[in-house]
Amino acid sequence: MPEQTSGYRIPHPRGELAFHVHGLTKVYPTAAGDVRALDGVDLDIRRGEILVLLGPSGSGKSTLLNILGGLDRGTGGEVVFEGRDLVKASDADLTRYRRHAVGFVFQFFNLTPSLTARENVELITEIAEHPMKPEDALELVGLADRLDHFPAELSGGQQQRVAVARAIAKRPEVLFCDEPTGSLDSASGVQVLEAIVKVAEETGATVMMVTHNAAVAQIADRVIRFRDGKVAELTVNAARKAPAEITW
Amino acid sequence: MSVLDRKLVRDLRRLAPQVAAIALLGGIGVAVAVMANGALTAVVVAQQRYYARTHFADVFASAVRAPRSLAAALRRIDGVVAVDTRATGGGLLDAPGLDRPAHVELISLPPEGVAALNRLVLAAGRMPAPGRSNEAVALKAFLDAAHVSLGARLTATISGREVTFTIVGAVLSPEYVYSPSESFLPDDAHQAVFWANRDIVEGVTGEVGAFDQVSLELSGDTDPVRVLPQVDRLLAPYGGAPAVTRANQPSNRFLDNEERQLRTLTLMLPPIFLLVAAGLTHMVMARLVETEREQIGLLKAFGFTALEVAVPYLRLAAVIGLIGVIAGGVAGVALAAALTRLYAQYFRFPAFEPQIDWGVYGATSLMAMAAAVAGAGLAAGRAAQLRPAAAMQPAPPVAYRRGLLSGARLGGFLDQPTRMIVRRIGRFPARAALTVGGLALSLTLLVSTQFLRDSLDQVIDRAYYRAQRWSAELTFFHPRDARAVTEAARLPGVIDAEPIRAVMAWAVGPAGRKQIAIMGLGPQAVLARALDAGGRPIAFAGDGVTLSAALAERLDLRLGDKVELDTLEGRRPRLLLPLTGLADDYSGLYAYMDRRELNRLMGDGDLASGVNLLTASDQTAGLYAAVERRPQIIGAVSRDAMVSNWRAQIARSFSTSILFYLFFSGAIAIGVSYNMGRITLAERSRDLATLQVLGFTRGECAYILYGELGLLAFAAAPLGMALGIAFSHALAAAFAQEELRIPVTISARTMAFAVTAYGASVAVGCLMLQRQLWRLDLVAVLKTRE
């Protein structure tokens, strides 16, 4: 597997364009008529930046995350990642994209219960091209002493940090986090955010995080507020706060 | 319709494929029981009615030649209500269109027209007219098989005399419902039975005013076994052979044996299917309760009692059972009719109708329902025990903990997907065991039903190619001087000829006595030999006797013991001879010894009762034409014809049954693998969707799903084979008859066939899951808690 080349591993210096989103629409046909989940989104995302997407339910933020993450396709417009348009990509292309370029952190962790922390990370490093060692990835999220614990033997915050380690162990270009603190208490949530910020800084990955929690927005470089399938507001944080400085 | 009823209907619809798979297995269990019992009842009913209508006798005996006046004495035996005497003769019949002469049995009809016992049923034509000496009726099975039409004139050589009959009628006889030939399978074209007026039969056999066969009807409360010695005593002065009860009458014995096999089938197969159905019901219901725990908690929070919560699951299982019972009943009735039609080809009853045994249907249906409800019992119990508060919490994630099968113990050589497979099996051992057990039974069923073919092959090989290597066997009307062999050697196409001397006798041992044939063979004979367990010819030494191993076992005789042989021919000497060998033969019960020694002990000269021939296969027509013209020869058997007849019948009966058993075994393997896969998929869907989000291909996810099934199927294979071999031994014991022992041999080809069919069935079960696996919702897993 390591010798296989995906085409998604061209190194990019920080600050260059990661995604170019132009006129992106997503329409769900329903009995009551078409629902426009995304209604012409234009957005450029730079390498290495931490981006937080805020907005009420149904505003389109998750739809955008799903399309950028290769789980879904837009109805119109374009999403260019390293010269390729994800809107026009095939299923196999999207699988390859997810396999080599993208890391995911889910709200409910989605760890495999039958595998230990180390093995959950190995699951991904076995199919990645230039992965970290699983132990290093877990070290990065502060779980060097929990390598051989099964998920059922870890707290929620620890499980989510295993999920972060699993997501970054392949050294992804982009890390997508969907409500990563949504099912955690404040203290655990801060630990998870610290892990995400730390690995983003150390691996240079772009982080795109969807959340309901406005406090989390303070750790971002830029904050995008969604309303009715459109980007309603784009704020640039002059100075990012460290996760430890925020609370909710 | 209550809300819970509506939920029941929707659950049934949602679980339709799984419900169908389970109902199918329960249905097969019921259908097999109904089918086997329907056919069994059909045989029993037809047999009883036929026997009653034709006054089928209770006791049969024969003598060389007894005066008809003896009938009155036999009639006076306590318990005897009717006596029927007749003259019979045997010989060869030249029927146009047959490649070799048929054996013919000629039986006398009483002058009053209707026999007291064993009456004939006229199927076509008429009975011989009184006083018309050249008319005869013949067994319908023979006329059909040999393509002889009414009005045909047939010439036979019977008891050394040539006689020509016009066939005026086709008849059925209760004595020939099933006519086993020498190979235990019917060969209707070469087994003719004629009935003609008494005067001509007595003329042909030279038995004027005498009889050689007698049958007796007993009153209902008379034990036939008690009558036998009295019959034997009366017939002894006239060369009487031991009387036998109906149980030992050849046709009846085969019917009884078939009934025994059908009973075995009824007892063995349905429980397998019901057991697997119960196991699957358990797995599906346990999963259902697991997914509905929040709803159960809610119902309990609303004040539903434990019973009210549990009963719907039992009702769902009962409905699944009921679907199987109804479908199985319908299929069973149709199959019973089909099986009865198949039997009609072998069993000649005047009336043979499929019968439905409603009692058995009812009992099996109850068992099927009980199996389904019992399968759901554990799950329903779990639903009843859930506490409202706990039930409304989502189920705790499946807790894998360090221990067996975790960590270093799996070593570094397994990749993570494989570890997921192995750990899950370790985490749910009961479910894995159920799956392995169910799959193993599927293979067991195939192996234990297909072994018979290999075993019969071995019987044929041993009997007709290793022990008896003659290509034709001639039987003389009376034992003749061994010089007759020289004469036989000059027949067309004969390469080699060896004399045999057969003498009927009782073999007596510590455990009882048994009527057998003593086979006198040449010590250097190559065309007929006795073989030991290793297939080596057994040498005859002096007056030493070799017994069929099965016979020695039955009589409780060991090597070195003295065997008592009470001969039934000539002066009937009682011989006491040392047992020097055990022959590993599969058919018949024999004593083998040196022919000359046997002749000497019998007080005879150098006699042969028949001759074994090795013939050129391209000259058989000439040989049989020559044999027909020799009145001294009353029997001619062709090995090739016998073997090919045997093989053809085996092939015919197996080609039908193999489809049944492939279907049965496939239903088990597909039902188990599909249901197990559905449950795994349901529990794993979140895992698998997550992996797809993380970049695993569908193929890699399929590996995790199918790998588990494959591993369990692989583990089940040796178990299934071992069980299959064990079942084969049990079945061989159940199907074996005294005259035909069935060795258990399973060829590599049969095993390969069974394993391939089994693997294919599991693969079909997997393929049925494919669609669900491909339709996993990747986005949903990001949003939902398990």
Image: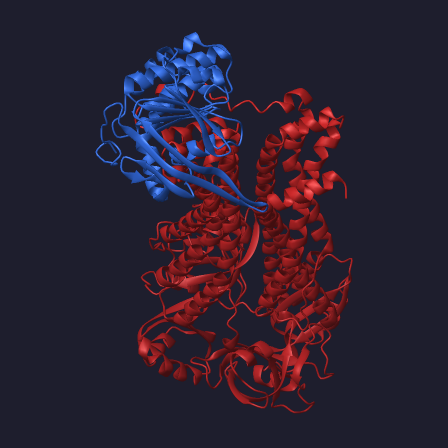
Chain colours: A blue, B red
Residue B197 pos. (x, y %): 65, 85
The residue shown at (26%, 30%) is: A129
Question: Compared with residue B702, is residue B44 higher up or lower down, i.e. above or below?
Answer: below
Residue nearest the viewer, comparing B180 with B104 = B180
The residue shown at (36%, 68%) is: B470
Residue A29 pos. (x, y %): 52, 46
Residue A91 left/right relative to B727: left
Residue B308 left/right relative to A24: right
Question: Looking at the image, can residue B508 be seen?
Answer: yes
- The image quarter in which residue B515 lies: bottom right
Question: Compared with residue A104, is residue B493 higher up or lower down, i.e. above or below?
Answer: below
Q: Quadrant of the N terminus of chain B?
A: top right
Residue nearest the viewer, comparing A188 with B382 = A188
- The image quarter in which residue B171 lies: bottom right
Question: Compared with residue B386, is residue B493 higher up or lower down, i.e. above or below?
Answer: below
Work out which residue is located at the far top of the displayed protein and give it: A245
Residue B686 left/right relative to A164: right
Question: Looking at the image, can residue B411 be seen?
Answer: no
Residue A41 pos. (x, y %): 41, 35
Residue nearest the viewer, comparing A227 with B206 = A227
- The image quarter in which residue A132 lies: top left
Number of numbered labels in the structure image: 0
Residue A14 pos. (x, y %): 26, 23
